Image (cartoon, grey):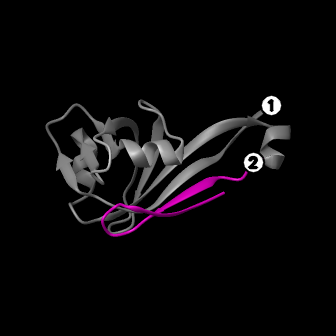
């Protein structure tokens, strides 16, 4: 049996852009993606701390060291520039793996710069 657990969380991200006319997804600074262990096209759940919206989308690699957190397509209507979001990534683990797993948490400051990473 496989269990779905939180693999990683990006905590305290600030939305820097919205692009409603784009096909859909979230663009994340490549550096943040790498530190969080998130791959391009990986499924993500986004939680908007400002308005309570929750939605699922996929990740697009953004330009490195820009702090980009851009909501694209329909999900762009669920946040505004400046909103705080939590970005969650889940993965499947065997029961044995699940017992040993600790999620990685990437903390960001107001400019989306990494301040700390915990496991």
Please tell me which residue is depicted at 46% across the width and 47% down the height of the picture: 45
Distance from the alpha carbon under mark 2 to that under mark 1: 16 Å
Q: Nearer the viewer, residue 106 or 99?
A: 106
Residue on which the image places disc 2? 101
Please tell me which residue is depicted at 34% across the width and 35% down the height of the picture: 60
The stretch drawn in magenta includes residue 102: yes
Residue 85 location in percent, x, y? Answer: 38, 60
* Helix, strand or loop under label 1: loop
Q: Which of 116 and 47 is in front in this view?
A: 116
The stretch drawn in magenta includes residue 31: no
Residue 79 location in percent, x, y? Answer: 26, 57
Please tell me which residue is depicted at 58% across the width and 43% down the height of the picture: 90
Residue on which the image places disc 1? 1
Characterize the local packing of mark 1: few (<14), some (14-19) or many (20 or more) Cα atoms within 10 angstroms.
few
Determine contact: label 2, label 1, CB under 8 Å: no
Q: Which of marks 2 and 1 is in front?
A: 2
Q: In this view, does 113 lie above or below 37?
A: below
Q: In this view, does 22 lie above or below 50?
A: above
Which residues are drawn in magenta?
101-119
Please tell me which residue is depicted at 40% across the width and 46% down the height of the picture: 31
Q: Is residue 63 left or right of residue 13?
A: left
Residue extending farthest to the front is: 65
Residue 19 location in percent, x, y? Answer: 17, 44
Q: Earlier in the sequence, mark 2 or mark 1?
A: 1
Residue 22 location in percent, x, y? Answer: 18, 35
């Amino acid at each position: 049996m496989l269990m779905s657990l939180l693999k990683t969380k990006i905590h305290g991200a600030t939305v820097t852009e919205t692009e409603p006319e784009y096909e859909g997804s979230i663009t994340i600074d490549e550096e943040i993606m790498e530190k969080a262990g998130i791959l391009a096209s990986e499924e993500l759940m986004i939680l908007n701390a400002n308005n309570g919206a929750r939605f699922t989308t996929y990740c697009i690699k953004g330009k490195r060291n820009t702090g980009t957190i851009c909501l694209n397509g329909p999900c762009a209507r669920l946040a505004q520039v400046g909103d705080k979001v939590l970005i969650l990534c889940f993965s499947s683990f065997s029961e044995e793996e699940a017992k040993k797993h600790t999620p990685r948490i990437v903390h960001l400051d107001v400019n989306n710069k990494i301040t700390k990473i915990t496991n």
